[in-house]
Image (tube, rainbow, N blue to C red):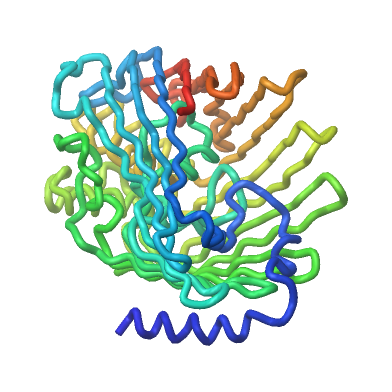
Amino acid sequence: MTLALMALALLTAADVAAAPGSEDGDLALIPELPNVPGPSPPPASPTSRFPQARLYLEDAFTLAARREPLVPLPPPLPYRWQNRLSIDAQVEGLPRPSLKLVLSDRFDVVAQEDVALWSHSTPRNELREAYAAWQPRPRLYFEAGRINVRNGVALGFNPIDVFRPRTLVGQASLDPSVLSRNRLGTLMVRGQAIGDRGAITLAWAPGLFQPSPLTRDAIGVDPRLDATNATNRLFASVSANLSDVSGQAVAYHEPGRSKAGLALTRPLGQSVIAYAEVALGHEASLLARALDFGQQTKTLPAGAAPPIPGDLSPAWRTDAAAGASWTVARTLTVNLEYHFHQGALTATDWDRWFDTGRAEPALGPQLWYVRAYAADQLEPASQHNAFVRLAWPDIGRDELELDCFAFVNLRDGSALTQVTAIYQVSDRWTFTLAASINAGSAQSERGSLPQVASVIGALVLYL
């Protein structure tokens, strides 16, 4: 019944949206920004039916430095070294002119400190996407399978990116733009109707499994569908381009949690693009959701009180991100953003977090669980943050690219900073070096983390 209603709605939308005009229409005028919402590209022409594959080998070696946090961290401690050898495949093909098959997968062999080399977690497989796309008529698409659905226009935090929780995979970078592109998709059915001035999307992701714990002793090749499909979720989106303003409105629902959101972009002159997104939802706070999830997965004791006082009842809460992108001399792009996450920890919550951790060390595991839950959900742990990113794709020579970013907690001034240099050795070889640091006082969000700094070197061979 759900699929029938989705099909009827999209067929109707296609007739309304597909006004006469060119195939690209005004959609081509939408400013290009990382994570800008938009329709999936149409299937390739019928002449390219053979599978097209993009394969590469990657070896990423990480060295990290630890410190003793103010609130003792329960085991296991973060590793000080890790090596990941991966083969990455992105394949798509057209068995029929109207049918496209897509696969995006990475197989890893991981060696790291304090883990036996031939343990069951040494081999790991990250099935990011595997789906089929059907085009029954021009500009109307139906897809089914595991799909990475990204929404939002900001770079550091996307309030309307509702499918981001529990999708993180091992990376050679902490850059949020990289994390959003290279992550686990969600098993769903999705329909899209594309017109000259916009698009309509409907998606349903079924809840097929019980939620899995944040960390568990599982075989490394597990596709982790119990992380991405642990509850029923409905999603609807309408995107449009009106004059020089591009927008996307979304609606989302899962049991006990609903959201509505809006994202807008607008060019300001030739070199600046302003953007903003906001989401309003009826949900519990980060603290309450972490406590509930821990008890649901039997990680925390049933009926346990919250480790710090807080409001556990659901309420209307707002998330927002606003910023601008400034292109300097055609090559350097600077992004500056402000992030607000109303359900996250307040200044009072942080004071209580540190006071409780020092006074009652036995509550340390529960205190750290709240922060681990926020990281697993890919959401800020603090209410107010700033984000700045510099991208320099041609720093003096075509082969060298420089990227750097910083998340700054506006309450305590602590920051996560990363600088990445990417050097294209040849058409087939690329070397990346990324250095990051968690800076701040011992009683701050970033300064209290056990990992103070890390350096990652990655060598990629394109096959």
Residue at (60, 19) in percent of width and height = 426
Residue at (44, 86) in percent of width and height = 8
Residue at (38, 63) in percent of width and height = 283
Q: Can residue 143 be seen here? A: yes
x then y, percent, for residue 352: 37, 38
Residue sitting nearer the eye, 306 or 451: 451
x then y, percent, for residue 193: 54, 74
Residue at (30, 53) in percent of width and height = 228
> Image check: 68 left or right of 433?
left
Give the position of the C terminus as an image quadrant: top left
Residue sitting nearer the eye, 104 or 151: 104
Q: Residue furthest right?
A: 269
Give above or below for 24 relative to 379: below
Give above or below for 331 relative to 263: above
x then y, percent, for residue 440: 52, 22
Residue sitting nearer the eye, 430 or 118: 430
Give above or below for 354 relative to 4: above
In which quadrant of the rendered view does residue 198 lie?
bottom right
Give the position of the N terminus as an image quadrant: bottom left
Residue sitting nearer the eye, 251 or 92: 92
Give above or below for 251 relative to 301: below
Q: Can residue 256 be seen here? A: no
x then y, percent, for residue 234: 38, 70
> Image check: 338 left or right of 261?
right
Q: Which residue lies furthest to the front in this view?
A: 47
Q: How many labels does the image show?
A: 0
